[in-house]
Amino acid sequence: MNQNLTTDRPTFVTHLECSMTGERYEADALHGLSRVGRPLLVRYDLDMLRAMIPRAMVAARPTDLWRWRELLPVRATRDIVSLGEIETPLVPLPRSGGPNVLVKDEGRLPTGSFKARGLVMAVSMAKALGVTRIAMPTNGNAGAALAAYATRCGIETIVFCPDDTPEINVREIALQGARVYRVNGLIDDCGAIVGKGAAEGRWFDFSTLKEPYRIEGKKTMGLELAAQLGWKLPDAIFYPTGGGTGLIGMWKAFDELEALGWIGPVRPRMYAVQASGCAPIVRAFEAGAEHAERWEDASTVAAGIRVPKVVGDFLILRAVRESGGRALAVGDPAILKAVDDAAKKDGLLLCPEGGATLAAYREALRTGEVDEDERVILFNCATGLKYPMPAADVALDRHAEIDLGLL
Ligand SMILES: *Cc1c(COP(=O)(O)O)cnc(C)c1O
C-alpha cells in the first residue's frame, strides 16, 4: 500500500461553516445542509498547518489524492475507503485545441470519472460518522462512484437516475452493488424522492452539495493542478458545470493554498461551461443575478451537466465573477464536433462534457475572451468510453478476393 495511506497524519479540521451566513457547525458530527438550506464548507487551522507542514514535504510524497491528507477532512487512516485515486495527467491538445491547451483527464480515476474524488471523501466520512444507508439522485457518474465506494465499505446504497441516463451508467451502478431505479423525470425530480426519504429518516441524503465532504474531495483538482504546474496556476480554467462542486472546490483550494503561502494571489479566470439546452448558471450570470432559476425542459447530450436547479448556484456565480471569468453555453452540435475533433486529430477520447469545454474554449478564442498564448486547462471529467460513439460497421468478407490497396 502506498505510504500516503499507511500512517495516520495530523488533521487540521476545526469546524464547518454555512456558505451563506458563516454560522459555525461542529466538526466530526453528521451534517446535511445548513439551517438556511445552503452547503456547509469545511474549515481548517491553516496557520497551524502552515507552521507544521512545509510544501516541500507534501511535494515529496507519492502523487495520489491522499498526498493532501492534512488538507482533507478524514482523520483516521482506517476510515479511508480507497480504490486507487491517482493524480490525473495533463494532456496537450495541440491540433484540436491549441499550443497552450492542456486537458486534465479525469477519466483515469476509479469508476472512470472525477466523481470518484468527491465520493471517496464523502463515503469515507460517512463511514467515519457511522452512516449505514445512503441515497442519491444522479445523472450517472456520481451514482457509479457512490456505489463502488459504499459497497467497498459495506454501506447500503439506493440510487435514482433519470430514465434516459446512459445505459452503461445504470448498469455499472447496479453491478457495483447499489439498488438503482430509473425515474421518469430529471435529476432534481430524483432529488425530491431522495429528500422525502431522508426527511422520513430512511437514509442519508448524498445529493450534490447536500453533504459537506464532496467539495473537499473535488478540491483536490485545484491542489493537484497547482502542484503539477509548479505552483503557478493557469490563466484560465474551463469547467463543465452541473452542480458546480468542482468549480467551487477548486476556488476554495486556491484560497487555502494562498493562506498556506504555497501559491501567490494570482488566480485563473474560471469559465463555467454549460450546454445551451440547460444553462441556468449562464442565464443568471448574464442577468447579474446572485441565484439561478430552474431551467425548464432541460436537454443536452452532455448528461453530466444536465442539472436544471443548483443548490450551490451563488457559490458558482461568486467564484466565476471574482475570478474575472464568465459562464458560457455551447450547443450540442459544437459539443459533438469537439469530441470528434479531439479524437480524430489528437487521439484523445473526451466525454461530451469534456467536449463542451473544448467547444467553449474555441468560442472564447473566436470572441477574444481568451488569447491563444494563454495557458488554459480544460476539464475532461469522465472517460469517453462510457458514452455512445458513432457506428463503425464496415465489414470484410475473408472468403472473397480482398483488394488490400483499397483498405
Ligand atoms: C458530474 C459531471 C460533471 C459536472 O460536475 P459538477 O462538479 O457537478 O458540476 C461534468 N462532467 C461529467 C462527466 C460529470 O459526471
Image (tube, rainbow, N blue to C red):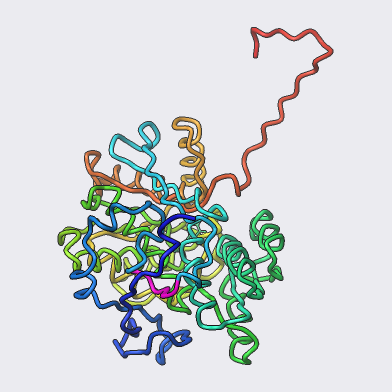
Q: Is residue 196 left or right of residue 263?
A: right
199 and 108: which is toward the camera: 108
* Residue drawn where x is 67% and y is 36% of the image: 391
| Region of the chain picked out in magenta, as a range | 71-76
Quadrant into which the C terminus falls: top right
Please tell me in which quadrant of the rendered image residue 375 appears: top left
Residue 318: say if magenta: no
Residue 72: say if magenta: yes
Please tell me in which quadrant of the rendered image residue 131 appears: bottom right
Residue 263 on image: x %, y %: 19, 59
* Residue drawn where x is 62% and y is 75% of the image: 190
Residue 397 on image: x %, y %: 80, 17
Q: Is residue 60 left or right of residue 329?
A: left
Vertical position of residue 132 compared to residue 354: above or below = below
Vertical position of residue 278 compared to residue 97: above or below = below
Residue 346 on image: x %, y %: 44, 32
Residue 350 on image: x %, y %: 50, 44
Q: How many marks?
A: 0
54 and 136: which is toward the camera: 54
Vertical position of residue 295 compared to residue 230: above or below = below
